[in-house]
Amino acid sequence: MNRRQFLSGVAGGGGLLLAGCLSPEYTKTHVYSAGETMIAGPTVTDDTAYFTIQVRSRDNKSNAGTLLGVDLTTGTRTAKIPYIVEYASWERDIPLQSTRPIVDDQQVFIGGRAPVAYDLSGQELWTVDFVEQFSAQASLRPPRVTDDTVYFGLSTGDICALHRETGEVLWKTSLGDGGISGWKPLEASIIAVDTSGVIAMLNQESGAIERQRTFKRGGDGGPFTVGSALSVRKDGVYVEGNGIVSRFGRELQTTWTQPLPLDWAHPPVITENNCYVIGEKPEDSTGYLYKVDRESGRLEWEKSLAAKLGGWEAVRAGDQIYTWGENQESVGVTTLDGDVVYEIPFESQIAGVREIEDGVSVLTTDGELFKVS
C-alpha cells in the first residue's frame, strides 16, 4: 500500500484522545469565507494567505480556477486572479497540494501538468506544457523560487529550471525514473531526492550534478517515497523514507540513519538540537511522535499521539507541532515534549496548515480560512 492510500483511508477512527491534555485553551479566529470549494493552499506571504478555488472541467483536460489573497489581520481580500492550469489525470495519483500557489515578490507560480505564472495584477507571465516538452505527467509538490529562477521536480525524475519572468527552460537534469519527491535550495546548490533511490546535489545555475548517491531499491520500490520531502539546514539534509530517517552532510555523506517502526511519516521537523518525526505504525495505523538527537541520530523517545494522521507535512509553530488528518475535521497540537495539548475541531475537512507569526493558518476544503493561536 502506498502513502496516498494510507492518507485516503484515515476517515475512521476518530480524532485525538484528549485525556491528560495540558490545556484545552486556544484561539480559533474565522478570517474569510470563499464560498467555493478550495483547490490548494494556503501559502502565507507578508501576512497574506493565498489559495485557489473554483475548479471546473474544460474538455476533461484543462481546469479553470481563481487565486485569492486574504489579509490575515483584517480578513479583507487583497487579490482575485482567474487562471487556467492543467492538472494531471493519470494512474499515479498526484495530490492537488502539489499545485499550492507560491507567491514571491508580487508574482505567483502554480504547478501541475502545465504550470503557470502570473503577477498579482492578474497579468499572465507564461505557461509551460510539461507533457509536450519533457514527457512529464506533472510537477510534484509546489515549485521553489529564487531571485531569477523557478525550479520544478517532475514525475519523470527530472529537475528543471525556468526563467521566472519568461518561463524559458534554462536546464533540465535527470536523477532517476521514480519521480522527484522533494528538493530545496542550499546556498548555490539544489538538494533533491527521487523515489528511485537517488539523492543529489545540483548546481543552481547549470543544473550540473555536483554530487550524487544512489541507494539500493527495497522490496516496495526504494528508500524514498512520494512523501520523502527534505528538511535542509546548513549542517546537512534530513529526510525520511520507508520508516528510516537519515541525516546527510553537506557532501551528501551519511551522517547517521535511524530506523523507525513506521509505515509512513511526514518530513522531519528540525529544531536546534533535535529531529522530530511524526508518522504511523503499520500494525495499528496510529500516529506516533519520535524525538531523535540531531547530532548523533540517537532515538530519545517515542510517544503515541492516539490519532490517525494524514496530510503531507507536520507544521512547527513556536514550541508546538500541528498535525492533521486528510479525512478528519480537526488539527492536533503537540508540544515538543510529545504531550498532546488539544485538538481543534472544524466543520469540514482540513486542506492545509501553514505557520504564521503567532500560530498557524488553517484552510478547509470548503474555502473557510482560519487563524489558530
Image (cartoon, helix red, strand yellow):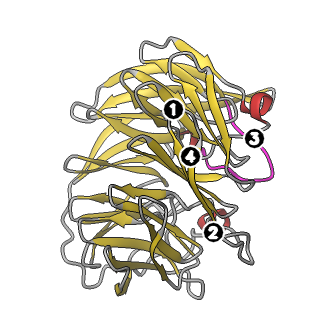
Q: Mark 4 sits on what residue? A: 141
Residue 105, by quadrant, is top left
- Most prominent secondary structure in the magenta stretch? loop
Instruction: Find the distance from the CA under tag 1 to the CA under tag 4.
Output: 21 Å
Q: Secondary structure at mark 4?
A: loop
Sequence-wise first label, 2 or 4: 2
The magenta segment: 86-96
**Crowding at label 3, few (<14), some or many (≥20) Cα neighbours within 10 Å?**
many
Residue 74 percent across, percent down from the top left: 22, 30
Sequence-wise first label, 1 or 4: 4
- Left or right of 196, for residue 148: left
Could you tell me which residue is drawn at 23 percent across and 65 percent down? 272
Q: Secondary structure at mark 2?
A: loop
Residue 5 percent across, percent down from the top left: 67, 66
| Amino acid type assigned to the residue bearing label 4 in the image | Arg
**Crowding at label 4, few (<14), some or many (≥20) Cα neighbours within 10 Å?**
many
| Amino acid type assigned to the residue bearing label 3 in the image | Gln
Instruction: Find the distance from the CA under tag 4 to the CA under tag 3.
Output: 13 Å
Quadrant containing the C terminus is bottom left
* Camera-nearest residue between 251 and 204: 251
Q: Secondary structure at mark 3?
A: loop
Residue 104, disc: none
Looking at the picture, does residue 273 appear above or below residue 184? below
Instruction: Find the distance from the CA under tag 2 to the CA under tag 1.
Output: 42 Å
Q: Mark 3 sits on what residue? A: 137
Could you tell me which residue is drawn at 43 percent across and 22 percent down? 107
Q: Mark 2 sits on what residue? A: 9
Quadrant containing the N terminus is bottom right
Q: Mark 1 sits on what residue? A: 205
| Amino acid type assigned to the residue bearing label 2 in the image | Gly
Asked whether residue 95 is drawn in magenta, I would say yes
